[in-house]
Amino acid sequence: MAAPLSASASDSGALIEGFIAYLAHERRASPRTLESYRANLEAFTAFLAGHLGEAPDGAALAALSAADFRAYLAARRSGERPLSPRSLSQSLSTIRSFYRWLDRRCGLGCPALALVRGPRLKPSAPRPVSEAHARALLADAASGLDAAEQAPWIAARDAAVLSLLYGCGLRISEALSLKRRDAPLPEVLRIAGKGGKTRLVPVLPVVAEAVQAYLAELPMTLAPDDALFRGVRGKPLGPRQPQALMAQLRGRLGLPPSATPHALRHAFATHLLGAGADLRALQELLGHASLSTTQKYTAVDAAGLLAAYAKAHPRA
């Protein structure tokens, strides 16, 4: 089908903005996802401007050859800031999504893209912390990193945030998106996850108690629509503070760099699976769109079982 003239003649910037608007309003992508897609596509079209000798319009994008796409991947692999194979694969995935949208909405298909293969990736298993280390992280957070100088409400806040990650399996962005009206936490919490997908997450009493302990210490009054977790200066808490907290805690406990806030979510999944949780139920609790994403945790659990067997069996 011939491309409409308006789309064919549109500059790449306008087409990117149309694609981002589609992701935001129809796919309900998160701000972080939109930022990543925009950065990848702007890098792609900036390369094409130099590669082709001029900024590409819709017709130029549709006329690219497989060699043009491979030249872009090669440039990103060996440039001043070379991308890792995983980042390169994500960049190519963004371009494929953009071209699918161009084909459907603008009639600007590019068959040559189907001939391009991304880098081979080694499947990476989640790296959770152990149950003992998870407990130690929560206990150290509750005690405060510097009890002599730190306000009690900050330690209570840190313990509440980490409790939500490990006790409910929330992403850090999901925990920080909670509002004051969400507390006291109910027995089942409704969470809006990636892509606007809503799921129900059971709340353990110990998690609800940690949040209530934080609110009891909080020295400020919050409106119902205010962010539940606050920074030292009263602004909504951002992800950097929990990340910095985990860096300090893992240094104190001698844990590897993989002990990040997200490792507590990994621990939630792995420990539930090890205790006999159903894989489908775990998929719902984590908010995974695909069961294959959840199945990664079975490899971690199997590795743990084999390690325990090797350690305990007299003939191992």
Image (cartoon, grey):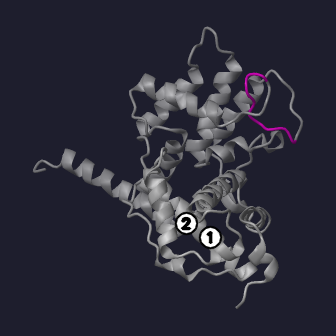
**Count of numbered badges drawn on the protein:** 2
Helix, strand or loop under label 2:
helix
Horizontally, residue 221 falls left or right of residue 1, namely: right
Q: Position of residue 71 (x, y in %)?
A: 47, 64
Q: Residues within 10 Å of mark 1 (few under 14, many from 20)?
A: few
Position of residue 160 relative to residue 312, above or below, is above
Q: Residue 12 carries which label?
A: none
Q: Where is residue 292 in the image (x, y as percent from the top left)?
A: 48, 68
x 57%, y 74%: residue: 64
Q: Are marks 1 and 2 in contact (CB under 8 Å)?
A: yes
Between the residue at mark 1 and the residue at mark 2, the CA separation in whole angstroms equals 6 Å
Asked whether residue 282 appears in the rendered view, the answer is no
Q: Position of residue 34 (x, y in %)?
A: 70, 56
Residue under numbered circle 2: 93
Question: Quarter of the image holding residue 302?
Answer: bottom left
Residue type highlighted by circle 1: Ser
Q: Does the magenta run of residues contain 226? A: yes
Per the picture, the main secondary structure of the magenta-coloured stretch is: loop
Question: Quarter of the image holding residue 235?
Answer: top right
Residue type highlighted by circle 2: Ser
Asked whether residue 122 appears in the rendered view, the answer is yes
x 44%, y 67%: residue: 118
Horizontally, residue 176 falls left or right of residue 266, namely: right
x 62%, y 48%: residue: 170
Which of the two residues, 212 or 307, is positioned nearer the viewer here? 307
Residue under numbered circle 1: 97
Q: Residues within 10 Å of mark 2 (few under 14, many from 20)?
A: some
State the residue lying farthest toward the top: 148
Magenta region:
225-233
